[in-house]
Image: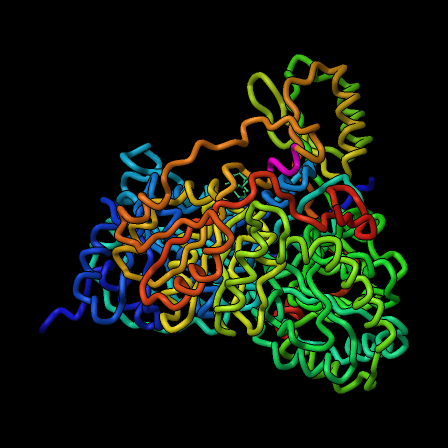
Amino acid sequence: MKDSRIRGAEIVIKSLVAENCDYIFGYPGGAIMPVYDALYDYADQIKHVLTRHEQGAIHAAQGYARVSGKVGVCMATSGPGATNLITGIADAQIDSTPLVCITGQVASPLLGTDAFQETDVVGFSMPGTKWNIQVRKAADIAPAIAKGFHIARSGRPGPVLIDITKDAQNELSEFNYVPCLGIRSYRPYPIVKDSEITAAAEVINAAKKPYVLFGQGVVIGNAEEEFKAFLDKTGIPAACTLLGSGALSEDHPQYVGKLGMHGNYAPNLLTNQCDVLIAVGMRFDDRVTGDLKRYAKQAKVVHLELDNAEIDKNVKCAVSVLGDCKESLPMLTEKVNEGKHDEWLAAFRTLEEKEKSAVVSLDLLPTKIGLTMGEVIRYINDYKKDDAVLVTDVGQHQMIAWRYFKYKTTRTQVTSGGLGTMGFSLPAALGAQLADLSRQVVCVVGDGGIQMTIQELGTIMQTKAPVKVVLLNNDFLGMVRQWQQLFFDKRYSFTELDNPDFVKIAEAYNMKATKVTERENLSDTVAEMMIHEGPYFLEVVVEKEDNVFPMIPTGCSVEEVRLS
Amino acid sequence: MNRYTVSLFTENFIGILNRVTLIFTRRGVNIDALTASESKEDGVHRITIEVTTTEDQVLQIVKQTEKIIDVIKSFYYKDDEVVYQEIALYKIPISSLDPGLEKVIRQYNARIISAEKEFVVIEMTGHKEDTKALLEILKDFNILEFARSGRVAVAKPMGTIEQYLNN
Ligand SMILES: Cc1ncc(C[n+]2csc(CCOP(=O)(O)OP(=O)(O)O)c2C)c(N)n1
């Protein structure tokens, strides 16, 4: 009788195929070599992207997951390969990005002996993963992967790590893939309670100045339509968090802007004037709330949230609605009154004008000589399609790009929000681009951040992903310099950079590259970039010491938002 | 600050204790005592943790522990909401055995559970205050070793984990 058993390594690949995984971002090494060997035979079913660093692999998987809505998959060898994933794991955990990370591990008899390239990656990643497991038998591989995918993508998504010993990869076992449909101890979607909906509707219906804050929960729940229907019926103004951007088109008449430290003036200021605050799929991060003791104290808070641990964590609410907003929003919409809040909306528009004259017009239509980050984004808006994806790194450019990019559709915002990981954007943009080759993907990055993962230009070269990289070069670690200027008496301690010739570097990676230093060349070059077929690298030399405003300094209240 | 008993029902999954205690560590809440054992449900384990902290903090911790995939359910109780016991063992040199010691053992409802050539081991179950009181007295008898377990506790509210598992 023919032996129907296959090697564990092949089980890994077949399991990934069974989960409809079409891309693996990874980097090989000794302890994962059997899986790479098995992958060789499946090139027609799964594409593998060889990044230049494992951190690049996981950020690429994150970008892929955020744009596609699917689980991102990355793979690394044991020891240093596995530990290089840790930053991305932490990033994915705090931003609720679904990932399955597969790591090779030394053979099980060697475990715990400090063998070559052994690290306890399960221990390392335990607090940062939604779930992790070490597999030491081939027969356990498929169930672990099935469980991993289920956990990664369900409920509040997150990263899962599956560590597979080398002997398990080599062992023979039957392959029989059974998707995981449920786990006894895990209830990812709490059932929405009618009583909570009724209570929430009562509070909302009694409100004079209700105000909606929305976050990434709307995107994760695929509840954009349901959310819009709620707004359309109630007429309530709505502002978004960093990761909520795109869940509602900025053209919507009730869209009033962005929240948080560098968000818009009106949405921050008026948080302390509404009477009912309706939070949908957002978690009251401290970058949004500022000083909690002076945050929305006058308001009754209604919180629609999937994760029970987020309810009352930072802000105590009057009514909580636990459950997926895809389910709870339509129930709520049915019970709330139709409404219009023209006067209240006008209050936002008045302050919006104030922000326009004090900040926005100077950023977008500058009169001084130096180029501003804002005008670069203005041109990107001019030439972008509605569903273009903006991927940003971390720093001033991130906040400026976010502030001025016109979000029209969902899944167009990819950035490292909760962790603020410099080096995120270049690999994440690659992953975002591979998730949908037909979309424009624009990566906006600073001169500091790009040098943390600049080697991923090599991956872009190899995959030919048509990413548009826009480097906003101010020769400074700009955001830190801004803080030094404002809060450390202009003591610019180690924030100035001597930079290389970035265009030469990009060209060395076979990328079309241009450097813009003059305003008159900016519009045309951005236009050229946006219609260019392949990858494109644009360096814009911007004002060295520009600041991002509005700003709520740390420890201040949302109403202390500064315009300068 | 108050004393709370956190009671967790979990799957018997590798590393579960680690995962649970990490939640306490991260919030800087010290674990006063911990016990772990099987429950009456097949495959369901229970972990009992005693902490001294604020109610806000313990509530957050309980919610965070419930996010752990293999935690079925967590609860927290004030002292008057649980029935609990701890066990204490006291090792006393044979040379200290005298009628005075016998009286103490009776008075505290303790008992000798092992008599070795050079020492005896006295056992007592009760609340921490009781086992500590006995410890203070036994210090006069040249006590050699003392060990006390964490809490074993059952809740006074009548809900059961089966009800939770079944709905
Ligand atoms: C890995 C990492 N290290 C340090 C920081 C702290 N940090 C936040 S913003 C910033 C400066 C970013 O500079 P640059 O990439 O040049 O962007 P700019 O602010 O100038 O737009 C630094 C160092 C971080 N967020 N991530």
Q: Nearer the viewer, residue B38 or A205?
A: A205
Give the residue drawn at x 78%, y 80%. Answer: A235
Q: Nearer the viewer, residue A206 or A439?
A: A439
Give the residue drawn at x 84%, y 77%. Answer: A341
Q: Quadrant of the N terminus of chain A?
A: bottom left
Residue B46 placement, left or right of A529: right
Give the residue drawn at x 56%, y 75%. Answer: A222
Q: Nearer the viewer, residue A441 or A128?
A: A441
Q: Is residue A467 magenta?
A: no
Residue A89 placement, left or right of B157: left
In x, y percent, where is residue A424? 46, 50
In x, y percent, where is residue B167? 64, 75
> Would you say residue A141 is visible in this rendering?
no
Q: Quadrant of the C terminus of chain A?
A: top right
| Magenta-highlighted residues | A480-484
The picture quadrant for ligand 1 comes to: top right
> Would you say residue A2 is visible in this rendering?
yes
Give the residue drawn at x 42%, y 35%. Answer: A499
Question: On screen, A346 above or below A115?
Answer: below
